[in-house]
Image (cartoon, helix red, strand yellow):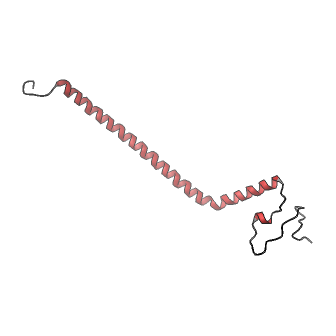
Amino acid sequence: MEDWRTSARHGAILAPPLEGKTQDASSTAPKHLTPAQKQLLKRQQELEYWKRHSKQIRSRNLITGLTIGAFVVGLFSYTILSVRQERIMDEIDDEAKTFVMKGPRTGANS
């Protein structure tokens, strides 16, 4: 008969069960694990984490993506508007240059 001290499957000494506390994967695992077993346990814990938090992470990523997209669209719109204003200013500058070259309108030269 198998008790808490030995395990036929693992061949290792296990820790006694904790009384009054819930046991998680790390408390039921043998204390002496090979590096491959440690890596497997870590990967399983990571997989469980991603399964539990994937919806929350997805919504955060969506909000971040929309925020970055809105910033890019705003910056692009501002740039286009600014370039249009520069063209208008260039036209006004051209009109001002021609006005200066013609000179002021007075009664003598009109």
In which quadrant of the rendered view does residue 22 lie?
bottom right
Residue at the far left in the pictured view? 107
Task: Identify the residue shown where x is 62% and y is 58%.
Answer: 54
Quadrant in which the N terminus is drawn = bottom right
Task: Identify the residue shown where x is 52% and y is 52%.
Answer: 64
Where does residue 11 sit, x and y in percent of width and height?
90, 61
Q: Is residue 80 left or right of residue 50?
A: left
Where does residue 27 sit, x and y in percent of width and height?
78, 65
Nearer to us in this view, 57 or 26: 26
Where does residue 51 sit, x and y in percent of width and height?
66, 60
In which quadrant of the rendered view does residue 33 lie?
bottom right
Quadrant in which the C terminus is drawn = top left
Q: How many labels does the image show?
A: 0
In which quadrant of the rendered view does residue 109 lie?
top left
Where does residue 47 sit, x and y in percent of width and height?
70, 57
Residue at the far bottom in the pictured view? 20
Q: In this view, does 51 lie above or below 109?
A: below
Task: Identify the residue shown where x is 81% and y is 55%.
Answer: 37
Q: Is residue 51 left or right of residue 76?
A: right
Q: Is residue 26 left or right of residue 14?
A: left
Residue at the far right in the pictured view? 1
Nearer to us in this view, 61 or 33: 33
Task: Identify the residue shown where x is 20% and y is 24%.
Answer: 101
Nearer to us in this view, 76 or 19: 19
Q: Is residue 50 left or right of residue 15?
A: left
Q: In this view, does 3 lie above or below 77?
A: below
